């Protein structure tokens, strides 16, 4: 496992506008290989909102040790696809790590349009840090349509007293709060006193700002 990347968390939410919940954890090391377990402390809340087990990991009480990456790799883009190079460029994939399924799962978040799962890496603030994240909480902050442009730099503020996430990070354009750093991705801000650079990477609009992707890197 790279020093740049720690564990990967399986994150679920009921839908847009609902809070993300970390429901599982994927660990990788040279001795034990790749393992998956559910985070029992968060399951009750998720179940109340309709969460059911992830396909391939049906038992909430079992730690899975076999074929974990094989199951999860089904969420990764096929290298032979014609649009693969554009996909890698968008997610800032290190071309030398395209065959590393663990890295690819975290770097591209394993996003699929058919469900509400994300695979979010717990990154470390070391040289070479560069990954794409997303603004959380847009449905509540409702920033003006013309507030953000690709290439804009955002400032941030740690929010450790946040009742939903003790490692929350607020995001601002000038003095206007646009939302928060996504769950799990916010943890890297609490691991360093160095400034982490946040740049608007991509914006999706449809009468309002629907999604804002960010590029996070060490400045």
Image: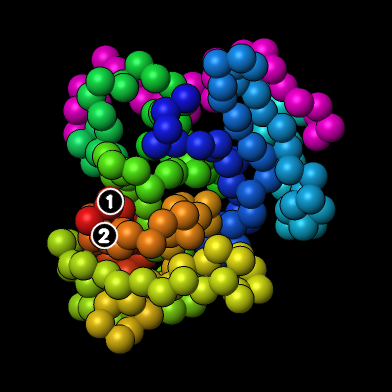
* Corner quadrant of residue 111: top left
Q: Give the mark nearer the N terminus: 2 vs 1.
A: 2
Q: Is residue 55 left or right of residue 82?
A: right
Report the front residue among 128 and 51: 128
Identify residue for label 1: 217
Q: Residue at x 25, y 20 (%)?
A: 96
Report the front residue among 131 and 55: 131
User: Local crowd at mark 2 within 10 Å, few (<14), some, or many (≥20)?
Assistant: some
Indicate the position of residue 29 as horizontal and vertical percent values: 56, 22
Q: Residue at x 23, y 24 (%)?
A: 95
Cα separation, mark 2 vs mark 1, equals 5 Å
Indicate the position of residue 69 as horizontal and vertical percent values: 55, 19
Residue 205 shows in the view:
yes
Q: Secondary structure at mark 2?
A: strand
Boundaries of the magenta span: 59-87
Give the quadrant of the C terminus. bottom left
Q: Residue furthest front?
A: 193
Indicate the position of residue 20 as horizontal and vertical percent values: 59, 57
Q: Is residue 72 left or right of residue 170?
A: right
User: Local crowd at mark 1 within 10 Å, few (<14), some, or many (≥20)?
Assistant: some
180 drawn magenta: no
Identify residue for label 2: 197
| Residues tagged 2 and 1 counted as in contact (Cβ below 8 A) | yes
Q: Residue at x 22, y 72 (%)?
A: 148
Residue 208 shows in the view:
no
Tell me: residue 80, above or below residue 173. Answer: above
Q: Secondary structure at mark 1?
A: strand
Tell me: residue 160, above or below residue 103. Answer: below
Report the front residue among 18 and 93: 93
* Corner quadrant of residue 175: bottom left
């Amino acid at each position: 496992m790279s020093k740049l990347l720690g564990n990967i968390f399986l994150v679920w939410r009921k839908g847009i506008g609902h809070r993300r919940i970390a429901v599982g954890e994927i660990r990788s090391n040279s001795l034990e290989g790749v393992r998956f377990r559910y985070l029992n402390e968060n399951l009750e809340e998720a179940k109340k909102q309709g969460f059911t087990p992830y396909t391939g990991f049906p038992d909430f009480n079992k730690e899975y040790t076999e074929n974990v990456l094989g199951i999860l790799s089904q969420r990764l883009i096929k290298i032979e696809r014609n649009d693969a190079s554009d996909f890698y460029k968008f997610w800032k994939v290190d071309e030398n790590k395209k065959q590393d399924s663990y890295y690819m799962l975290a770097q591209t978040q394993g996003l699929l349009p058919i469900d509400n799962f994300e695979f979010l890496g717990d990154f470390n603030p070391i040289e070479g840090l560069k990954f794409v994240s997303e603004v959380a909480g847009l449905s509540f902050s409702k920033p003006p349509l013309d507030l953000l442009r690709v290439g804009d730099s955002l400032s941030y503020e740690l929010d450790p007293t946040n009742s939903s996430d003790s490692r929350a990070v607020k995001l601002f354009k000038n003095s206007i709060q646009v939302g928060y750093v996504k769950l799990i991705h916010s943890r890297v801000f609490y691991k360093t006193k160095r400034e982490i650079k946040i740049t608007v990477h991509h914006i999706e609009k449809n009468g309002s700002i629907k999604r804002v992707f960010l590029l996070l890197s060490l400045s």
